[in-house]
Image (cartoon, grey):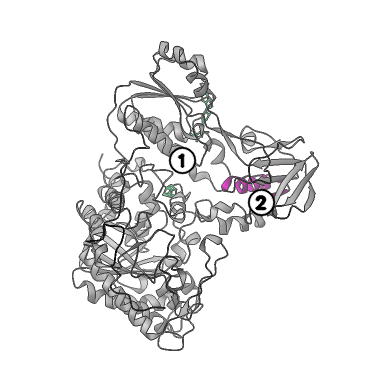
Amino acid sequence: MARNAHYDILFEPVKIGPVTAPNRFFQVPHASGMTNSMPRMRAGFREMKAEGGWGVVCTGYVSIHPSADDTPLPMAKLWDDADIRSHAMMTDAVHRHGSLAGVELFHGGGMVMNRTSRIAPMSPSGIGWMPPYANFMSHLRPRAMTRDDIADIRRWQADAARRAKDAGFDIVYVYGGMGYLPHQFLLPDFNRREDEYGGSVENRARFLRELLDVTRDAVGPDVAVATRISLEQLRARPGTVAETEAHEVIDILSDHVDLFDVKMDSGPIDCPPSRFRPEGSHEPVIDFVKRVTDKPVVGVGRFTSPDTMVGQVKRGVLDLIGAARPSIADPFLPNKIRNGHEDEIRECIGCNMCIASWHDGVPVRCTQNPSAGEEWRRGWHPERIAPKGLSDHVLIVGGGPAGLEAALSLGRRGYQVTVADAAAEFGGRLRFEAGLPGLRQWHRVIDYRLGRLSQMANVSLYTESNMDEEGILEFGADRVAVATGSRWLPDLMAVSETPGDLPRGPRVYTPSDIADGAEIEGPVAVFDYDNYYMGSAIAEYLRLKGKDVTYVSPAGHVSTWSIMSNDLPTVQERLLDRGVALRLLTRVTGFNGDTLQLADFMGGRPSDIACRSLVIIGRRQASDGLATALNARPDDLAAAGIRSVEAIGDAHAPGSIVHAVYFGRAYAEGLDGRSHADYRYDGPVLPDGLDGPVAARTTPNMRAVS
Ligand code: ADP
Ligand code: SF4
């Protein structure tokens, strides 16, 4: 199909200093969780985006020195010449497709805890980050940097930049945002220095400017120099010679960079879940940059619509359309627009499971794209899959995320596929969940798959088709996947932190009951020991229906796991704004239909509140009954010509949608083929001579830093 001429502008080359991006699609640096310890997986992950048409593909943040040690968060490094080969795998892979490779050199200053290197962290004035979340806390405070420290960091930056050039990168960044060291110099909250690095904007920008200059000197004339800079707080501070300090900083740095990559100040705002912020939410903060500089500007906004992208360029907001999440969800987004197939874009849903995987310290996972991170080790491709094996016809019972992903992947393999769902519409759990406040975009998981499936001649889709054992035996498929989901159970939580007794009173519900249409009488308590989005979403949903709602959780925060997905800082505020009462660090111990008995989670001190209904968001049980029953009838299966019956998705193991989609893909990959439990092992590229258990080598550029 021909490309829509309106989108031609997105395929114009853009000059970035001495290099030229072949188009405006720019995969900005984002962590992949793979680091130097999984260099082949990393190269495979980034290469897929180059293959899919991204003109620039960057690797994740790369530490310049052991004093910038962000562990256990998975950072890459260029501490040593021995690290070069590991990164060269990625640049070679990206260059194979004619794309530019970028690297974001990083020093975290007082934002990193140096947990592995055990070097005292440094910051401009000895001020560190004091997050109230255990995963990010440390008890070691940074020391104030001396001029010698500043000189050291310039040197380390130059060394790392030279290594980046040797590794084949075309664009080398200085990371000046997100509270990392150069950003700490820019912000008076962190920078209370009285020397030439503190005070005026010009002084506070000096450190970043110097890092850019040493980078330029180190990489020479053929490599572009970029900075990624956070502008939220700077934009809120009035300037002395321009409108705001952000305007002044961009102006000061403009002659020292080839590219500005502009963003917000903190993860939850910079990379917010779609539950709380829409596409393009950065614009009010970054819209001025192009008016101040003539250097190209890249920025993000979870852009998936080509019309929005064209608007950003035509309105003079951005020159390059930056993406992290949309490029994970669909590495082939640019090529789909290029070829006139924009309706086939697998749009990011903004769930932030990808970010949660970084916080977990593991390779990236994506709800929409189950092949993300599996390109090299499992050989999965987001658009292609191996042709079918011996089997012919697969019946999939259940058309939720798992069933539809299995159907899509099996359909692509060339099997005859039938999906039967009991409900009037496909979608499974998302029929209900995408209707909860803020979760509408999650329905893209279903929309994308149904859109593709409806075009496939070898796939038949049936709704209102409740399947039982006899119906499946009679159907005539030779393989059966049971994707019938799971149900929430109304157990309370025992002292042992395992599911406990059932409450005895009436009007006890679960999310499954509400999805089935249960009417809830207020006042209602929502007891959440699942700790992800469901508890807070149900509490907000019921509150919006006018009920008096109390949210109860044994955790210390609302939806406490959602610190991993960047929801947590907003979610509690949202419930309070809506008028939901909170009882945190509290367990429900009983309910009689009028009174809810509670106990402090730690000490057990009892209390109670009046309420008429209780909704329990605790554990789920796989609805795998069909698979279990059929597998207990091997003779009947053999007589029916059915070679296997397998539970997949939540019916296999209840989880988040990311897990269901992954299991759907794994089933399709494994049919007549290799099990997903069987994958290639990646390992670090070791320095020469460092292949035994004992190494005498030290990092050569270490000064004695206390
Ligand atoms: P997953 O997340 O694993 O995809 P979901 O709970 O989202 O699971 O979807 C399960 C789907 O299975 C639902 O749409 C439900 O209507 C359907 N389903 C459950 N039991 C049957 C059955 N016996 N026959 C057909 N469809 C069923
Ligand atoms: Fe988007 Fe979710 Fe995939 Fe991240 S995990 S890229 S937020 S769909």
Point out residue 493 in the picture as x, y percentages from the top left corner: 67, 43
Extreme residue toward the top, this view: 639
Image location of residue 227, percent across then percent down: 34, 70
Q: Is residue 635 above or below residue 172?
A: above
Query: Dividing the image into 4 quarters, which one contains the C terminus?
Result: bottom left
Answer with left or right where residue 438 lies relative to residue 96. right
Image quadrant assignment for residue 432: top right
Badge 1 amino acid: His
Q: Is residue 237 above or below residue 685?
A: below
Q: Secondary structure at mark 2?
A: loop
Quadrant where the N terminus sits is top left
Q: Which quadrant of the view contains residue 622?
A: top right
Check residue 538 for magenta coloring.
yes
Where is residue 69 drawn, in percent x and y? 40, 67
Q: Which residue position is annotated with label 1?
A: 659
| Residue 464 appears anywhere in the view | no
Q: Which residues are magenta?
A: 530-554
Evaluate whether residue 374 shows in this view.
yes
The reply to whether the residue tagged 2 has its Cβ within 8 angstroms of ligand 1 is no
Q: What whole-number distance in Å separates the C-alpha atoms at marks 2 and 1?
A: 25 Å
- Give the percent coordinates (x, y) of residue 237: 50, 77
Q: Is residue 44 above or below residue 252?
A: above
Camera-nearest residue between 3 and 150: 150
Residue in front for this viewpoint, 413 or 391: 391
Q: Is residue 572 left or right of residue 12?
A: right
Q: Quadrant of residue 226?
A: bottom left
- Farthest bottom residue in view: 195
- Is the shortest distance between ligand 1 and the CB of mark 1 under 8 Å? no
Toward the viewer: 88 or 408?
A: 88
Q: Is residue 170 left or right of residue 495?
A: left
Q: Find residue 554 and name its label.
A: 2
